[in-house]
Amino acid sequence: MQPDEVDTKKIYMKHSRFVIPDKCSMIQIPKNASSTTAMWLRPEYESSRLPVENENLIAILREPMDRWRSGISQAIKCDWTELHLLTKLFDKGRTMVDFHTLPQYLYLWMYRKHNIKFYTFGPNVINEISSDYDIPYTQNISENTSEDRSKTYDVIDRYLDDNPEFIDLIKSTYIEDYKLFEQHIMPNKITVRALPSRMIPGMMTYLQLTL
């Protein structure tokens, strides 16, 4: 096994979904409007058990590069002095820093044998879900346009422009996510490379990762 690979046979993920009884259950994927969904669709409870029969499972997918940019921006907390993180990642052949940058399909893995209705991340996605399942809501997604976040995005984009090989690394890391996003095809097995070891102790309670 290569140094930047993990033994996928030892990976076990248990991830929760927000449940709106008699309506739908939304599988939560960080950086895919999960916080917005919880705020505006007001699910009744959270569950990490396998879905029951006839439960309407839904999930929001996001273009992988766009999601990575958002996750990296959050990881460095809009602090330009932390942009050396990109160089460190690139030098180690890595792209993931915490659970915000884990591949999207990992959050769907425990539900892979169930039917999932997919939505595309965007400003109207909450409205689409609300309309499809007759769920009242009070506000839609708004793009994060804070000046600091926008500047951080610009710096990240310039870094990628100067290091196009890093773009290739990102695309190869999230190749299964691209298939999922473009074709709604789940992989047959977990294929995670370059999992960041420092993220493991800080995982959120609804995501358990054991190596």
Image: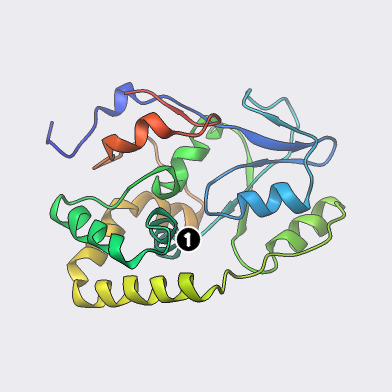
Q: Residue at x 61, y 55 (%)?
A: 33
Q: Position of residue 206 (x, y in %)?
A: 55, 31
Q: Residue at x 19, y 60 (%)?
A: 87
Residue at the spot x=20%, y=77% of the render? 162
Q: SS for tag 1?
A: helix
Left or right: 87, with 37 as reference point = left
The C terminus sits in image quarter: top left
Along the horizontal axis of the image, is 196 left or right of 45? left
Q: Is residue 20 left or right of residue 194?
A: right
Residue nearest the observer in this picture, 113 or 36: 36
Residue 129's image quarter? bottom right
Q: Amino acid at mark 1?
A: Glu
Dot 1: within a 10 Å radius of its alpha carbon, few (fewer than 14), some, or many (20 or more) residues? few
User: Where does the N terminus fall, quadrant-wise?
Assistant: top left
Position of residue 85 relative to residue 208, above or below, is below
Where is residue 185? Give x, y as percent: 47, 48
Q: Disc 1 marks which residue? A: 182
Q: Nearer the viewer, residue 204 or 34?
A: 204
Q: Where in the figure is residue 146, as x and y percent of width and height?
A: 55, 73
Examine the rendered structure and indicate whether residue 81 appears above or below residue 18.
Answer: below
